[in-house]
Amino acid sequence: MRFALFLFALLFTATPALAAKTILVMGDSLSAGYGIRPDQAWPSLLDKRLAEKHLDYSVANLSISGETTAGGRSRLAQALITHKPTIVVIALGANDGLRGLPLGQMRDNLNAMVDASRAVGARVVLAGMRLPPNYGPYATDFFASFKSIAQAKKAPLVDFLLEPLNTQPQLFQADNLHPLAAAQPLILDHVWPTLAPLLK
């Protein structure tokens, strides 16, 4: 009897716990938590929400301030190998737009990131951005690019990542570009309805 119990205990303790599935966030300063503590950024708040809801997911936030779609594309292959994500959130493009980079190049990079993520079995969420109206027709084409990619790839789209803050300038830092810590829960609440259906 003791031997049987010993074997049972050995088998039980030798069985590894199932690892949490990973949500990989590839973004720029808006997701990296520029000007605030990293644990205050919306991806960190997402990680906490997943734990509170007892969902078997964790967040790997690989967002970097100043990142462009080209930079994200160059880093993605290794990130997919390292983190083996179930879901990839692509929140890039703002720096391409602010620098006036060719939109065809931005679209090519985003399309490649969607394809690479899906090639390893990950589901993709795309987050769109807007530019100030003084960018003229370029700003219009820039914003439309995210919707056209999402439609072509049949990918869920967060139309504009900062939509909840659009009429609340007090939620931005002094540079009028980066959200304060107080704004991060609003961003998460905006992303959540698009992301939640993928948490299967």
Image: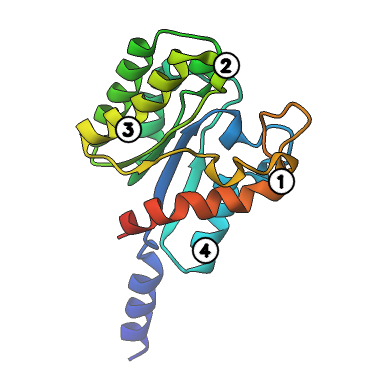
Label 3: which secondary element: helix
Question: Do callouts 3 and 1 mark residues in contact (Cβ within 8 Å)?
Answer: no
Quadrant into which the C terminus falls: bottom left
Residue 22 pos. (x, y %) = 41, 48
- Tell me the distance, in whole angstroms, between the alpha carbons under discs 3 and 4: 31 Å
Q: Amino acid at mark 2?
A: Asn
Q: Is residue 145 visible?
A: yes
Query: Which image quadrant is residue 172 in?
Result: top right
Which badge, 3 or 4, is on the more N-terminal residue?
A: 4
Q: What residue lies at 36% left-to-right and 29% top-to-bottom?
A: 146
Viewer-side residue, 139 vs 91 = 139
Q: Which residue is mark 1?
A: 181
Q: In the rendered image, which residue does mark 3 sit on?
A: 147
Q: Residues within 10 Å of mark 1 (few under 14, many from 20)?
A: many
Residue 180, position in %: x, y? 72, 41
Q: Which amino acid, mark 3?
A: Lys
Disc 3 to disc 2, C-alpha distance: 21 Å
